[in-house]
Image: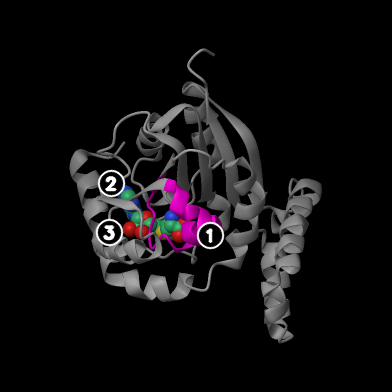
Amino acid sequence: MMSEIDVARWLAAEMDYHDSNAHIIHAEVKQGDLRYDAPKRLFFLPYLRFPGERCIVDIACGTANSVATLLGSRRDCIHYIGVDISREMLMIARSNMTNGQFVQASGHKLPLEKGVADYVFSWGALHHMPDVVVALDAIINLLKPGGLLFLLEPTPRVGTGWEDSPRERGVRITTIRSVIQCSSCEFISIHYINSRFTALVRRMLRKLKMSRVEHYGATRYLLTYLDLAADRVCGSLFSFFQGRDVIAVVRKAASSE
Ligand SMILES: C[S@@+](CC[C@H](N)C(=O)[O-])C[C@H]1O[C@@H](n2cnc3c(N)ncnc32)[C@H](O)[C@@H]1O
């Protein structure tokens, strides 16, 4: 377990890193990330309901580009709260989610009321945190009874050399499972996406100067299904076919359960 001083050092370093690199990261993600775009539409969007003003808390929202793209025009009929440790990231996020409320804070210590959220997004958030268990606990506490957590995180299968910031590392699914089991939550869906196999398919498309094909809606969905099939059929035998990111929906028990 990390000492308080080490945690504070870690958080300060993450903040500095993302403040200094916010505009570079923004330029990279502005086009959207094809590896995550279709999976979010397939596995998250069907669970989101928009009657009334639903509250979404987006942990480590970054530039909020990806949430704005996913919600489209529906972003105007929700109460959105973006949380990030980096002030510069939040400045960019404001331009993507103009009706949103933004809070500069660490995912470890959230200055938000318990049970405030219908939905919590944790997309590429936990793997930046010094203590995944503490952060995931804090995130779950934000959910109303019956609320949903949408998780998308890299696992250690991603390997090294992919990182943005020097501290990030994959989140173990066993860690996520144990926190979920100890809280009054259950998995509604869990999938593994982005195998090395589909990364190779994408690279080949680009080599063949067919990168535009990759952007077509149909190809994005096809690649996602190919990913899931590869992981299910061959993933347990060959790591080449294993999905390296976990995408999951978790539900907090309704109070009467
Ligand atoms: C990979 S980006 C995720 C962006 C966003 N969720 C998305 O889907 O595009 C990681 C973000 O985590 C933020 N971050 C890092 N450590 C954090 C912490 N302890 N608490 C809150 N945000 C943190 C960074 O500032 C950065 O904006």
**At label 2, which amino acid type do we have?**
Ser
Residue range highlighted in magenta: 57-78
Q: Where is residue 208 shown, x and y percent of the image?
A: 74, 85
| Name of the residue lying farthest toward the bottom | 209
Disc number placed over residue 106 in the picture, else none: 2
**Identity of the residue drawn at 28% across and 37% down:** 112
Mark 2 vs ligand 1: CB below 8 Å: yes
Q: Where's ligand 1: which quadrant?
A: bottom left
Q: Which of 68 and 212 is in front in this view?
A: 68
The relative height of residue 212 versus residue 186 in the rendered view (above or below) is below
Disc number placed over residue 243 in the picture, else none: none
Q: Is residue 61 left or right of residue 190?
A: left
Mark 2 burial class by Cα count in 10 Å: few <14, some 14-19, many 20+: many
Identify the secondary structure beneath mark 3: loop
The relative height of residue 156 versus residue 223 in the rendered view (above or below) is above
Identify the secondary structure beneath mark 2: loop
**At label 1, which amino acid type do we have?**
Gly
Look at mark 3 in the image and give the residue it sits on: 86
Q: What's the CA distance linking mark 3 and mark 2?
A: 9 Å
Q: Is residue 108 left or right of residue 219?
A: left
Look at mark 1 in the image and give the residue it sits on: 72
Q: Quadrant of the N terminus?
A: top left
Mark 1 vs ligand 1: CB below 8 Å: no
Mark 3 vs ligand 1: CB below 8 Å: yes
Identify the secondary structure beneath mark 1: helix
